[in-house]
Image (tube, rainbow, N blue to C red):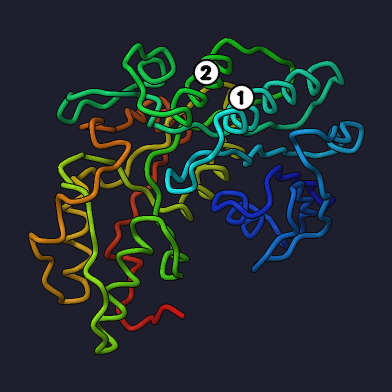
Amino acid sequence: MNKKIISIIGSNGMLSCFLTKVYYNNNNQVDVYGLNPPTDYNCDNFIMINLLKDQLDYQQLIKSDMIFYASGAGVQAALKTDSSLIYTLNVFVPVEITIQLKKLNYRGIFVSFGSYMEIGLNNENGKAFTEDDIVLSSNPVTNDYALSKRIYGRYMRDFNADYIFWHFILPNMFSYNDIKPGTRLIPYTLQYLQAVKRGENPKKPDFSEGTQTREFILMEDISQVLNKAIEKQLHSGIYNIGGGDFMSIRNLLERIFAIYKIECKDEFFGKEIRRDGDIKSLKLNADKLKKAIDYLPSTKIEDIIKPNEVCL
């Protein structure tokens, strides 16, 4: 069997790391494009590139069987990312890539990703939003990240090309790797719980009120979505990857605390103001994808968190 060439644009983000690990080995050649060399994972070729000023080698890129655009900016509010950088990496660069691939008669598969944060401010109390609900939303957004993703999603809705393209809209994600320290909600929580488990007296966590309802899927289940999409020859278009647990942030945290058999105290909640606090409900209607590939993620947080695993 000939090796498949998989190109991943973006080197050390959560999604790009995951995709590289999925496709590395298994008779694939994985080429990673990014500003910084890969850390904590391997690839066949690393191509250093600054997407803000350097030109991709499209003659090389079009040799790829699959191209993933997994670069981006602004997903972590705590980083205070410059707005110009957000729009460049989330809109202008991927749009340019889709155009160049079209000009060069690319015949592989191009994959990009959106966020259900594009839905914007709402108080729908559990409504499941379709793909059009999201990219055509007129709800106000609270930050440049959500707006940039909505702009690109709208573009992909109306985009046409001879190559296959999939734009997957993602909910919140957790991962087996979330036992590692980090600033995201689950790693942040696990660091506290692990410290308590070790007999330490860590600073108590500061969570938001936690009343926002969100959908959560296991990142590793996305690889099965991709496998099914290839197997079923999924048509080009925008698809919501839903199907996971739908719950309040507080309920998620209470479930994680329960796994560790540690009390989740009321005093932990209501002190931190998050940028998505006014977005009361985010849930994806994934009927379109389920009908096309007969699969949606279903792993629950209790299936992956192991209290005996210690954060380093």
Q: Which residue is drawn at 21% across and 76% down?
A: 260
Residue 92 lies, in percent from the top left, at: 67, 23
Task: Out of 309 and 141, give the one closest to the viewer.
Answer: 141
Q: Is residue 46 above or below residue 94?
A: below
Separation of marks 1 and 2 at Cα, in angstroms? 7 Å
Q: How crowded is mark 1: few (under 14 residues within 10 Å), some or many (20 or more)?
A: many
Q: Residues within 10 Å of mark 2 (few under 14, many from 20)?
A: some
Q: In this view, does 112 lie above or below 40?
A: above
Residue 280 lies, in percent from the top left, at: 20, 32
Whether pointer 1 and pointer 2 mark residues with C-beta atoms closer than 8 Å, the reply is yes
What type is the residue that disc 1 sits on? Val
Q: Is residue 235 found left or right of 215 in the rendered image?
A: right
Which of the 4 image quarters holds residue 64?
A: top right
Residue 124 lies, in percent from the top left, at: 18, 24
Q: Is residue 154 above or below residue 60?
A: above
Going from the N terminus, do you reach mark 1 or mark 2 first?
1
Say the numbered circle drawn on residue 60. Answer: none
Number of dots carrying numbers: 2
Q: Which residue is drawn at 71% across and 15% down?
A: 161
Task: Out of 147 and 285, give the one closest to the viewer.
Answer: 147
Which residue does the numbered mark 1 point to in the structure image? Answer: 91
Which residue does the numbered mark 2 point to in the structure image? Answer: 151
In the image as oriented, which residue stretches furthest toward the bottom? Answer: 199
Q: Is residue 30 found left or right of 58 in the rendered image?
A: left
